[in-house]
């Protein structure tokens, strides 16, 4: 089971995630987020000194293309997650340079397959999160069956208020899914925005990695 821990703002914690076997770390480059890396003093030069192997995913919301690609180069990002209203053509242009994840906020009133269809040839992955009034996570879980009872044409990240208490449910759901790529966690594992409770992360990883 692949695990992504999003909203990382501290180099020491990034190194700890790597030691725990976490596959992906999310770095948020959206100024409206309380986990915006610049607001926490995290700089690209700090990461380059460590030469980490953990995959770094940059999270952006409606950012200019040149800004996204500049961050990819400066920060050594392996993937980009687009969490706004980015068009399929925008996503495709980014995807020509780096593996790209398009995030969708799941609304029970919408047809999810219809919603993702225009992006099927524009990105490598989808990410499904809980619908909220603002961009980014809500800390709330949506009904996974809105994803699970549909045949997705692309690997996806499952996000949205997942905590340590959902570890068994996550494992059971993952077993039933053909293209679930990774579990994405964030606020339920925090001491404060951007600072993780590493003991909880360790427990979560130990359970899911040993199934």
Image: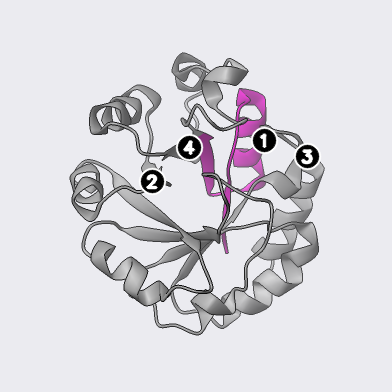
Residue that appears at 40% across and 61% down: 126
Image position, residue 122 (x, y; %): 23, 57
* Label 1 or label 3, whichever comes before in sequence order: 1
2 or 1: mark nearer the eye? 2
Q: Which residue matches tag 3? A: 197
* Label 3 or label 4, whichever comes before in sequence order: 4
Label of residue 82 in the image? 2
Compute the Cα span from label 2 to label 4.
22 Å
Q: Which residues are magenta?
A: 1-27
Q: Residues within 10 Å of mark 2 (few under 14, many from 20)?
A: many
* Label 2 or label 1, whichever comes before in sequence order: 1
Q: Which residue matches tag 1? A: 16
Image position, residue 184 (x, y; %): 58, 54
Question: Is residue 211 in sight in this rendering?
Answer: no
When asked about the image quadrant of residue 203, the answer is bottom right
Label of residue 53 in the image? 4
């Amino acid at each position: 089971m692949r695990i992504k821990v999003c909203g990382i703002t501290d180099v020491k914690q990034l190194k700890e995630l790597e030691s725990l076997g976490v596959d992906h770390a999310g770095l948020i480059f959206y100024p409206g987020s309380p986990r915006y890396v610049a607001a926490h003093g995290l700089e690209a030069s700090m990461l380059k000194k460590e030469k980490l192997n953990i995959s770094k995913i940059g999270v952006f919301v409606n950012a200019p293309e040149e800004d996204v690609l500049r961050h990819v180069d400066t920060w050594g990002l392996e993937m980009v997650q687009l969490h706004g209203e980015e068009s399929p053509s925008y996503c495709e242009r980014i995807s020509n340079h780096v593996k790209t994840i398009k995030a969708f906020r799941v609304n029970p009133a919408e047809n999810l397959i219809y919603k993702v269809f225009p992006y099927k040839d524009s990105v490598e992955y989808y990410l499904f999160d809980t619908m909220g009034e603002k961009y980014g996570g809500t800390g709330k879980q949506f009904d996974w069956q809105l994803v699970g009872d549909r045949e997705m044409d692309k690997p996806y990240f499952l996000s949205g208020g997942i905590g340590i208490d959902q570890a068994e449910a996550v494992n059971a759901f993952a077993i039933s899914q053909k293209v679930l790529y990774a579990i994405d966690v964030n606020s339920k594992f925090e001491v404060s925005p951007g600072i993780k409770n590493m003991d909880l992360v360790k427990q979560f990883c130990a359970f899911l990695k040993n199934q």
